[in-house]
Amino acid sequence: QVQLVQSGPEVKKPGASVRVSCKASGYTFTSDGFSWVRLAPGQGPEWMGWISAYNGNTNYVQKFQGRVTMTTDTPTSTAYMELRSLRSDDTAVYYCTRGARPIDYWGQGTLVTVSS
Amino acid sequence: EIVMTQSPATLSVPPGERATLSCRASQSVSTNLAWYQHKPGQAPRLLIHGASTRATGVPDRFSGSGSGTEFTLTISSLQSEDFAVYYCHQYNNWPALTFGGGTKVEIK
């Protein structure tokens, strides 16, 4: 069965960077891409962008352009999302998901807390 | 950006009763609409895609309908495991996908 297992919680100071990993299993890694979605307290989910696991092509939401980088590593079947210049309003649970149209599987989420 | 508005924010329903959740898009998304169920501490689960197609393994008490800007998720007879937050999600407007704010279904 499809599984997406994410890295553990992170606590960061404002201005720092965070990298979240997502190890995929149960399907052919390069057959689909990954969307990254975040869920902040009291808000609905926010789609951040997508990366093709086949060729590395990316689409980022304009709001995150210049601050986010999504990558994949085929030999380890792992996707990564790095977010830089963190602010307090980046505090959220970050999810890696498979696909985009639609998203069909979600990881368990990684809590990223940004606090001084 | 297409804004997705869900109503109500909270729905209180007795077990065994029907629940009807609404989702409205600020512009047409055709039938490129999905519904997800999210329980605390768990990964969200795809219930419906293409506005009305149940995902694999989803019980038939869940049904989706609508097209364009108005969509509905119906749970015909609420079971204890159905109490959760439900999100709608449009994937028509690439690459600016958006979600609704969610409807929490709670036990009455």
Image (tube, coloured by chain):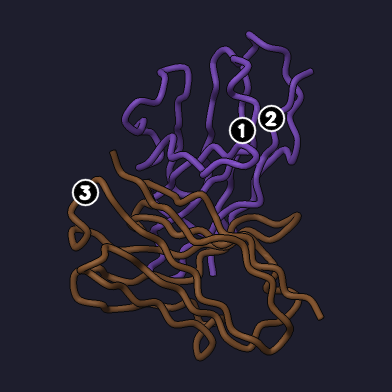
Chain colours: A brown, B purple
In the image, what residue occupies the spot 51% across and 43% down?
B44
The chain containing the residue under callout 3 comes to: A
Q: Which label is found at residue B105?
A: 2
Q: Is residue B82 above or below residue A93?
A: above
Task: Tell me the quadrant of the picture where the C terminus of chain B can be found.
Answer: top right
For mark 3, give the secondary structure: loop
Depth check: give the residue in front, A5 or B87: A5
Q: Which residue is mark 3?
A: A27
For mark 2, give the secondary structure: strand
Q: Which label is found at residue B21?
A: 1
Circle 2/circle 1 CB separation < 8 Å: yes
Depth check: give the residue in front, B27 or B2: B2
Cα gap from disc 3 to disc 1, whole angstroms? 33 Å
Left or right of A1: which side holds A60?
A: right
Circle 3/circle 1 CB separation < 8 Å: no
**Percent of width and height locating residue A96:** 45, 60
Cα gap from disc 2 to disc 1, whole angstroms? 9 Å
Circle 3/circle 2 CB separation < 8 Å: no
Amino acid type of the residue that numbered disc 3 sits on in the rendered structure: Tyr
Depth check: give the residue in front, B62 or A41: A41
Amino acid type of the residue that numbered disc 1 sits on in the rendered structure: Leu
Q: Are marks 3 and 1 on the same chain?
A: no
**Percent of width and height locating residue B91:** 41, 57
